[in-house]
Image: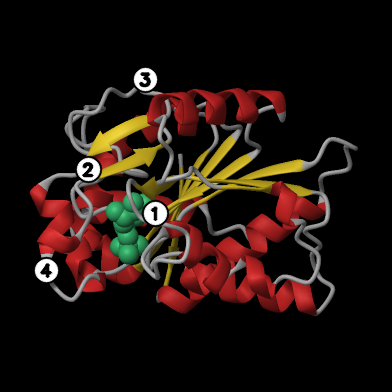
């Protein structure tokens, strides 16, 4: 596992955007580059920087297919808290060459959630698998909507949200946890770890415990993010604020090993 420690949120986002753009630019196959994407506050700065690069001609999305991590069950596209809305508002609508037909987001209004999830997995496989999955993380370590005790080999499916997550996410729903949908559709931990590379953003003091569990904790379904320890291409991009619960040795180790400038 690589852990990239940056001074602050903006630098973390810049690093992640540079990394993603470099990977897309280095992809010379005719098969499109397949990019997994998250929602949440964490990736907003990455999206902003990728949009800037795309407009400046530094990276093209014309040969990129995207798959989003998750979607609330029961929210229509036009609901301003649906992840479909979030992704278009914060990213896709601003790219100059993203093809709408290359955007994949689980349909939270489907009448057949199980079929929808099975088809999502099939489509990922048909595209040749995910080259790079960017993710965020919940304060309880959830990756996508894989709450504590979701199987580390889970696939795309329906997820019940914990009360804790509904409380945390209620900041987007008028601070009323009851307004946060109780269920979501989400890729599984196995779906994420099948990707060639996984890049997870962890920022802020409130994520310090989750970062420590991801990097130093046991591999356990209690902290589903800890599955990344078993992945051969996992990168955590974090800021100083999120490092508060790491041991001094761990912190120094990752700074030391990343000293030689490399992307
Ligand atoms: C939600 C999403 C996750 C996301 C998490 C953290 O629960 N389903 O994919 O990583 O929130 O969000 P934030 O980045 O806003 O802290």
Of the two numbered discs 3 and 4 on the same chain, state the one appearing first in sequence: 3
Q: Are marks 4 and 1 in contact (CB under 8 Å)?
A: no
Mark 3 sits near ligand 1, with its Cβ under 8 Å away: no
182 to the left or right of 20: left
Determine crowd level at label 4: few under 14, some 14-19, many 20+ residues with C-alpha closer than 10 A. some
Q: Earlier in the sequence, mark 2 or mark 1?
A: 1
Select label 2 or label 4 by which is in front: 4
82 displayed left or right of 168: right
Q: Which residue is mark 2?
A: 213
Of labels 4 and 1, the one closer to you? 4
Q: Quadrant location of residue 174?
A: bottom left
Q: Are marks 2 and 1 in contact (CB under 8 Å)?
A: no
Q: Earlier in the sequence, mark 1 or mark 3?
A: 1
Q: Nearer the viewer, mark 2 or mark 1?
A: 1
Picture disc at residue 153:
3
Say which element carries label 3. Answer: loop
Circle nearer the viewer, 2 or 3: 3
Whether residue 262 is visible = no
Asked whether residue 63 is in view, the answer is: yes
């Amino acid at each position: 596992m690589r852990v990239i420690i940056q001074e602050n949120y903006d630098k973390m986002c810049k690093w992640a955007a540079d990394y993603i753009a470099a990977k897309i630019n280095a992809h010379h196959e005719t098969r499109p580059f397949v990019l997994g994407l998250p929602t949440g506050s964490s990736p907003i700065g990455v999206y902003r920087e990728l949009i800037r690069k795309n407009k400046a001609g530094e990276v093209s999305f014309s040969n990129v297919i995207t798959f989003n991590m998750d979607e609330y069950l029961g929210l229509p596209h036009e609901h301003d808290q649906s992840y479909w809305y979030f992704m278009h508002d914060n990213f896709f609508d601003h790219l100059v060459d993203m093809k709408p037909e290359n955007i994949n987001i689980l349909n939270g209004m489907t009448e057949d959630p199980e079929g929808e999830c099975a088809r999502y997995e099939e489509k990922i496989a048909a595209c040749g698998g995910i080259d790079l999955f960017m993710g965020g993380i919940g304060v309880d370590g959830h990756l996508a909507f894989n709450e504590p005790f979701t199987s580390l080999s889970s696939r795309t499916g329906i997820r019940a949200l914990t009360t804790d997550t509904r409380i945390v996410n209620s900041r987007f729903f008028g601070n009323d946890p009851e307004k946060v949908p109780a269920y979501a559709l989400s890729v599984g931990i196995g779906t994420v770890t099948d990707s060639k590379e996984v890049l997870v953003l962890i920022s802020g003091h409130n994520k310090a415990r989750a970062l420590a569990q991801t990097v130093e904790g046991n591999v356990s379904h209690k902290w589903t993010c800890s599955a990344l320890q078993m992945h051969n291409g996992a990168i955590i991009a974090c800021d100083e604020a999120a490092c508060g619960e790491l041991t001094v040795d761990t912190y120094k180790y990752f700074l030391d090993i990343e000293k030689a400038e490399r992307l």
